[in-house]
């Protein structure tokens, strides 16, 4: 059986594995797309949060360090399966959660991306209205509250049109909007060069009495920020042909712009008491600079939302009910919630949904811990791509009814660990938090619980593990002493299909 | 999520067969690990130490 040409042309619109010939993004194209995806209004909000607890120099270092640590976790968790088989982040969870249990990470992904996209599209519409007013295209007061919903609708229509071309649409939008990353760096240069003495002397407004707590919170904010790239990363890196092409674009394209652009918000809140660059650039450089800044914010949010909706649509494609729907229908299904929020309840969503997103974000650290433990320790880097798409009680990743209870228990344990260490909404913390952060122990505890629970799964002969797989050298020497006790069908399947 | 699936769709079957036939399916190579250690461990460690 060969892959038909029309099917190959639309392969990036499915959640099925991409063939090497379809994975055509080189390092430069991937870097550009990832950088455009990463740069958005959330950078100022992150910078503002860090600036509440740390000064400019220490805040920059803590945030940058945290971002790189979080990015490493995400790359180690979702990266291997995505780069080997050309699949997205959700499909990569099937070996851990099961052929039905992957719905849990899929829902996390959908809620996180659709939630963030809704926020960003509202930011986009608001900054676009301000830009139009600043350019004299709109009168300051005319139109009132109808402008934001109308611009939201316009943005959704443009994103829908661009994404009709699948991943190519994401890349196209990134090519057009990539310049905004440099505009952001120019804005950072402006504030640092104009206000350096004030910057280094500025004191954070909400700093806790314990310096270690403040510093750890700076690192934690960085880790949490880049962990939230988990839902996005698979849909992007699967377009690159191999792991060699992926690592530097992820580390420098997806990770580095976040701390760099967050410094704009960090500097702004420390010196001018506002993280919004369109406000402080007016102070620094007058109305022209404010227009440039508004154009930057508008472009940044548009690029990120486009990539997010693409990643979310590919993730939803894993649901069997949506596999046979047209790409246009799936895009509408993904964009509609974002459009509805932006049109009907922008202010309510703005005020209330941030806390929910903070809670959802707690789950990504445990998810990474589970995937890393499963792939590198328990499975010794062996995955069965056929088993990811095959259902039935005898299939390797079916576990019990398609669900792996070990993964669910580990996810719950990781989330509980995080919340015990740090309440993500109130920032109330335990005495251990300043020494450990919250995300790293959450990932570690989830990995540990997964490891222990998986020993029971292996003992039951489920999950497609080789007995004693985690013992050093078991695979290398082909040692599978108790293999005869396994389900013969499963054993034959493994022999034929393990890649 | 879907019911019992006895056979894969032909298109998916073809893709999986093609992937299974390419035995060189690897994740990250030596340089990839080098950059990950550098940017994910060494650099953050140095930044945390310097900043603190």
Image (cartoon, grey):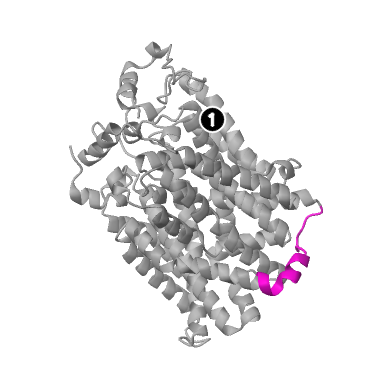
Indicate yes or no whether the magenta region holds residue A202: yes
Please tell me which residue lies in front, B38 or A338.
B38
Quadrant of the image containing the C terminus of chain A: top left
Kindly identify the residue that appears in the image at 52 percent across and 20 percent down. A472
Question: From what the image shows, is residue A455 above or below residue A158?
Answer: above
Please tell me which residue lies in front, A335 or A34.
A34
Judging from the image, mark 1 belongs to the subunit labelled A
Quadrant of the image containing the N terminus of chain A: top left
Kindly identify the residue that appears in the image at 82 percent across and 54 percent down. A209
Please name the residue that numbered disc 1 is placed on: A450
Indicate yes or no whether the magenta region holds residue B35: no
Name the secondary structure under disc 1.
helix
Kindly identify the residue that appears in the image at 63 percent across and 42 percent down. A418
Few, some or many residues within 10 Å of mark 1 (<14, 14–19, 20+): many
Q: Where is residue A413 in the image (x, y as percent from the top left)?
A: 59, 35
Question: From what the image shows, is residue A444 above or below residue A127?
Answer: above
Please tell me which residue lies in front, A483 or A247.
A247
Q: In which quarter of the image is residue A495?
A: top left
Q: Where is residue A464 in the image (x, y as percent from the top left)?
A: 40, 25
Residue A89 visible in the shown view = no
**Direction right: furthest residue:** A209
Q: Quadrant of residue A206?
A: bottom right
Q: Where is residue A16 in the image (x, y as percent from the top left)?
A: 31, 43
Magenta extent? A192-209
Residue A212 visible in the shown view = yes
């Amino acid at each position: 059986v060969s892959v038909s040409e029309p099917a190959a042309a639309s392969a990036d619109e499915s959640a099925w594995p991409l063939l090497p010939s379809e994975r055509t993004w080189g390092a430069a194209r991937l870097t550009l797309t990832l950088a455009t995806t990463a740069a958005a209004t959330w950078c100022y909000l992150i910078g503002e949060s860090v600036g509440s607890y740390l000064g400019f120099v220490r805040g920059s270092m803590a945030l940058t360090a945290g971002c790189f640590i979080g990015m490493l976790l995400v790359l180690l968790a979702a990266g291997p399966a995505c780069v080997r088989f050309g699949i997205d982040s959700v499909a990569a969870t099937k070996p851990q959660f099961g052929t039905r249990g992957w719905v849990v990470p899929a829902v996390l992904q959908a809620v996180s991306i659709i939630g963030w996209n809704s926020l960003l599209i509202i930011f986009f519409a608001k900054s676009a209205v301000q830009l139009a007013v600043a350019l004299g295209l709109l009168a300051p007061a005319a139109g009132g509250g109808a402008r934001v919903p109308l611009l939201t609708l316009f943005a959704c229509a443009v994103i829908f049109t661009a994404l009709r071309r699948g991943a190519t649409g994401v890349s196209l939008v990134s090519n057009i909007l990539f310049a905004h990353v440099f505009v952001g760096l120019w804005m950072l240069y402006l504030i640092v060069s104009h206000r350096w003495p004030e910057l280094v002397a500025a004191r954070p407004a909400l700093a806790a009495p314990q310096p270690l707590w403040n510093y750890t919170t700076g690192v934690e904010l960085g880790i949490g920020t880049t962990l939230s790239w988990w839902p996005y990363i698979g849909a992007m890196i699967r377009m690159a042909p191999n792991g060699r092409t992926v690592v530097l674009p992820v580390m420098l394209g997806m990770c580095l712009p976040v701390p760099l652009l967050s410094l704009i918000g960090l500097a702004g809140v420390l010196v001018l008491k506002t993280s919004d660059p369109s406000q402080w650039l007016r102070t620094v450089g007058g109305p022209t600079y404010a227009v440039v800044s508004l154009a930057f914010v508008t472009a940044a949010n548009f690029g990120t939302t486009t990539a997010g909706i693409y990643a979310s649509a590919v993730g939803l494609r894993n649901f069997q009910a949506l596999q046979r729907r047209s790409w246009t229908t799936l895009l509408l299904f993904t964009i509609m919630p974002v459009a509805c929020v932006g049109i009907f309840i922008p202010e309510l969503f703005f005020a209330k949904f941030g806390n929910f997103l903070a809670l959802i974000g707690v789950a990504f650290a445990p998810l990474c811990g589970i995937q890393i433990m499963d792939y590198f320790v328990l499975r010794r880097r062996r995955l069965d791509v056929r088993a990811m798409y095959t259902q039935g009680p005898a299939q390797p990743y079916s576990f019990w009814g398609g669900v792996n209870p070990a993964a669910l228990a580990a996810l719950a344990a990781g989330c509980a660990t995080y919340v015990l260490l740090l309440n993500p909404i109130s920032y109330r913390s335990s005495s251990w938090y300043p020494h450990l952060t919250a995300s790293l122990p959450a990932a570690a505890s989830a990995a540990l619980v997964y490891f222990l629970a998986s020993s029971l799964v292996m003992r039951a002969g489920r999950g497609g593990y080789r007995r004693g797989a985690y013992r050093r050298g078991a695979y290398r020497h082909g040692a599978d002493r108790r293999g005869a006790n396994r389900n013969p069908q499963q054993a034959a399947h493994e022999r034929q299909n393990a890649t | 999520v879907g019911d019992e699936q006895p056979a894969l769709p032909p298109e998916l079957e073809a893709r999986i067969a093609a992937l299974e036939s390419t035995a060189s399916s690897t994740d990250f190579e030596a340089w990839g690990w080098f950059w990950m250690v550098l940017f994910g461990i060494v650099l953050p460690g140095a930044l945390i130490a310097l900043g603190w």
